[in-house]
Image (spheres, rainbow, N blue to C red):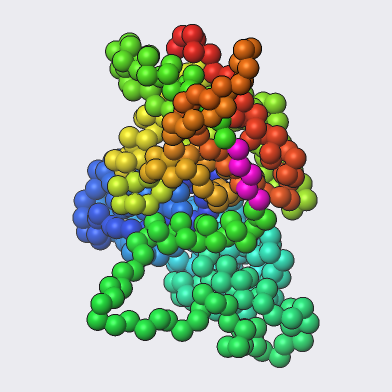
Amino acid sequence: MALVDLIMPKLGESIMEATILKWHKQPGDSVSLDETVLEIATDKVDSEVPSTSAGVIEEILWKVNDVVPIGSVIARIRTGAAETVTSTPSTPPAPPVQQAVVVDSKPTPAPQTRQVVPQQTQTNRFYSPLVLNIAASEGVSMSELESVPGTGNEGRVTKKDILQYVAQRQLRPAAELNTNNLPAPVEMRVPISQIAPDLSPAPTVNGNTEVMEMDRMRKLIADHMVRSKQTSPHVTSFTEADVTNLVMWREKCKKEFEKRERTKITFTPLFIEAIVRCIKKFPLINSSLDGYNIHIKKDINIGMATALPSGNLIVPVIKNADQLNLVGLTKQVNQLADAARNGKLKADDTQGGTFTLTNVGTFGSLMGTPIINQPQVAILAVGAIKKRPVVVETPAGDSIAIRHMMYLSMSYDHRIVDGSLGATFLTAVAKELENFDPERDF
């Protein structure tokens, strides 16, 4: 008999940990190859973890709601093989810093195993790679990090703990940030008089008030939005576009398009097509920031904000959108939107976005001020298309005509994108839409 380790799989380039939602198998249950063992969730998407071997569940190492670093052993399966093996997913192995959790999940006295713990921690306390990355980006030293109270499994510091600490840390005078002057870690806590507004006493609840806890996805969205505002100085520019030609072309072609391509054409792929053309003219919009280094992305991966039946929001990504024609864009948009609404998105479907489009007009809004989807530097919102009387310039002079008008707004990170670039890019997108060829084929 042999024990096979079931490893938390790598679910995307930027995902460093996952939360266990549900175990489908318990110790003693038999499991076949590729059968679902548990469900997990990241800040991007939910997913299922299949068994990498056939056998019997010998041991489960993590509980429901535990946050588990990628690469950690989450369960052990007893098989009929003659030797002990470690079964790993097809994805690349986790880096050494992620393997440190194996020591914490099953301590052993062997000194060779303890040496796996990253030297920079200089402590037996485990920190996930995500927490370490946030601490490094916010300038939190290791000695300071050791004083942060943890609410996770066995007192570990979670993403929520470090973000809350950073927010509180910014409220203190600069002199207090020198941890060498503090006699004990407990003094790292913020005095009650300096607590941020979001930690103020809870409002009084009377008989006419319903208290409803956020679901898991809404909590993740809330954390993501707050962090984006704390990270990027947002600026929003506005413009409007006469999209009459685009509207009339779609109305004329939509039945033939659906008959030929067996999928409906919406305005979204038309908007994405215009955005891609403008990104090629202004590549700095398609970038991210790492400290003082600007990373300009060569791939153009467009995220599209999609509303779920639950009311939550998710952003599937169209990879290499610049390499797709209108038919290809349309099929990608529809497939990803359907997968999102039916809970069928894969982890990779929400990874790698370089620019995001959100259609606030779907719900009747004329315009909006969207929040940047980190680590991107810009997000464009399109509003509802409305008929309005506008002044039209003609060779015979100006006239008033009924046109299909739409507002566009773009929020951008002012650390990288100045107002001139942001406004110029937004205007270019509007011009692309206005100059849409009503005689084009699809």
Q: Is residue 125 above or below residue 192?
A: above
162 and 329: which one is in front? 329
How far across and down, in percent of the image, does residue 309 sit? 30, 47
Left or right: 275 as drawn, with respect to 403: right
- What residue appears at the point 69 percent right and 80 percent down from the top-left corner? 172
Query: For residue 241, what is the image quadrant?
Result: top right
Residue 380 appears anywhere in the view: no
How far across and down, in percent of the image, does residue 436 sit? 54, 18
Q: Is residue 270 above or below residue 203?
A: above
Q: Main secondary structure of the magenta part?
A: strand
Magenta span contains residue 162:
no
3 and 276: which one is in front? 276
Query: For residue 142, what is the image quadrant?
Result: bottom right
How far across and down, in percent of the image, does residue 215 sit? 34, 61
149 and 35: which one is in front? 149
Please state the total of marks drawn on the protein image. Answer: 0
Residue stretch rendered in magenta on the structure: 235-239
Quarter of the image where the C terminus is located: top left
- What residue appears at the point 53 percent right and 34 percent down from the top-left corner? 302
Query: For residue 192, what is the image quadrant?
Result: bottom right
- What residue appears at the point 53 percent right and 13 percent down from the top-left corner? 437
Residue 341 appears anywhere in the view: yes
Q: Is residue 229 above or below residue 141?
A: above
Left or right: 244 as drawn, with respect to 290: left
- What residue appears at the point 74 percent right and 45 percent down from the top-left corner? 418
Looking at this view, name the residue that lies furthest to the left.
Answer: 29
